[in-house]
Amino acid sequence: MRRRLALLVAATTCLTLVAFLVPLALLVRTVAEDRATVRATADVQGLVPVVGTADTATIRLTVEQLTAESGRPVSVYLPDGTVLGAQEPRTAAVALAARGQSLTAELDGGREIVIAVQGRPDGTGVIRTVVPRADVTAGVARAWLVLAALGIVLVLLGLAVADRLARTLVRPITELSSVSHRLANAELTARAEPAGPPELREVAGALNHLAARIQVLLREEREQVADLSHRLRTPLTSLRLEAESLRDPDDAARVAAAVDGLERAVTGLIRQARWRSGPADTGSGTVTADAAAIVGERVAFWSVLAEDTGRTVTLDLAAGPLPVAVPADELAAAVDALLGNVFAHTPDGTGFTVRLTREAAGAVLSVSDAGPGIPAGLIARGASRAGSTGLGLDIARRAAQASGGRLDLGAGAAGGAVVTLRFGPAATS
């Protein structure tokens, strides 16, 4: 922006100077020419009385004195053809002046001045002098240099003033940009200092108001999530009591383990909602989980339901430990979301395969089934075709992206759906 403002001021200043200095330069040259012409004309005008009344010897002596004083050649053409002073041939201007007309004519080497002298008894005499080109343009070059220097100084002064003004505009804009980037990086305490023109001060105030509003909304959202999560503790407690009252010890242990896992997830959600004030965890390696252990545990949990619904479960699990840059609860939630989708969107008796492989870039988890497949656009948050919340694939996608990976959707050889999660590796210390 500073460069553009400087270019704009430079262009405007140059156009203004051209419009002002070019006519002034031409005027200086014209004035110099007229000054030299008037000076030469005044010199030869003093010869008019002498040429009109004196004899030839007096005229010759006067012409020689004037030539010596002025430094210009002076010629006097008498009616009888005698030429006194500088012996120059008669020109067209001299011939015209002999008829009684004084004039000034341009020559290659300067400017020719001829004056007709009438009143002599033998006819009209003519006085002729030539102003050299050096006299005509004397001082013009120096005046032009002064004008050029003045123009350069004015352009530089204009650029300096423009740069000063541009700084007063660019500095607040740069600060606004910096504050907006800090807000984008979840530094919600960042504020802009109102400065610069009134428009920029208004923008800074609006940005500060937006940042404060974002803080309020996030605080309200976290409190709502925390309150909602806290309300789940009562039904969880009831569910635990119901599990403990089951007669079959295996069923009681299995349901109690599920309740414990759900309670841990709710506790983690409350903690994140209430106390996480910084940027979200991006999976930088500070939080890791063993993908092999968690995937095996969740598949074992869902295998009981798969057995009840007549589904065949195929598990291809890489040897552990297999650390990935995802918190354990988020990884478990992602696996549950994928397996839950299989049960929700495929008919009973449809088998599925869970495969976890180790790669140099991390781990790859794929869940494939022999069902009808996944329609296009179902990965959008809230989209569902079976009356569910539509958050399952989005939860899995965000878990993969938090580790630096991604979620891919595809179709299997038998036409079923294949959901692939690629997790980034855990950072090594």
Image (cartoon, rainbow, N blue to C red):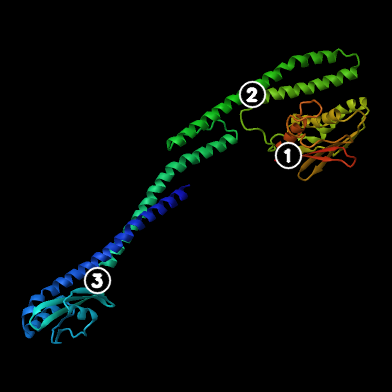
On the image, numbered disc 1 is attached to which residue?
A: 426
Question: Image quadrant of residue 333?
Answer: top right
**Cα distance, mark 3 to mark 1?**
89 Å
Residue 187 drawn above or below residue 3 = above
- Amino acid type of disc 3? Val
Disc 3 is placed on an element classified as helix
Residue drawn at x 89%, y 25% is 305
- Position of residue 391 in the picture relative to residue 30 (left or right): right
**Cα distance, mark 1 to mark 2?**
30 Å
Question: Image quadrant of residue 225?
Answer: top right
Indicate which disc, 3 or 1, sits on the residue closer to the N terminus.
Answer: 3
Image coords of residue 101 (percent x, y): 18, 75
- Amino acid type of disc 1? Ala
Disc 2 is placed on an element classified as helix
Image coords of residue 204 (percent x, y): 49, 34
Disc 1 is placed on an element classified as loop
On the image, numbered disc 3 is attached to which residue?
A: 136
On the image, numbered disc 2 is attached to which residue?
A: 221
Residue 394 drawn above or below residue 159 = above
Identify the image quadrant of the C terminus.
top right
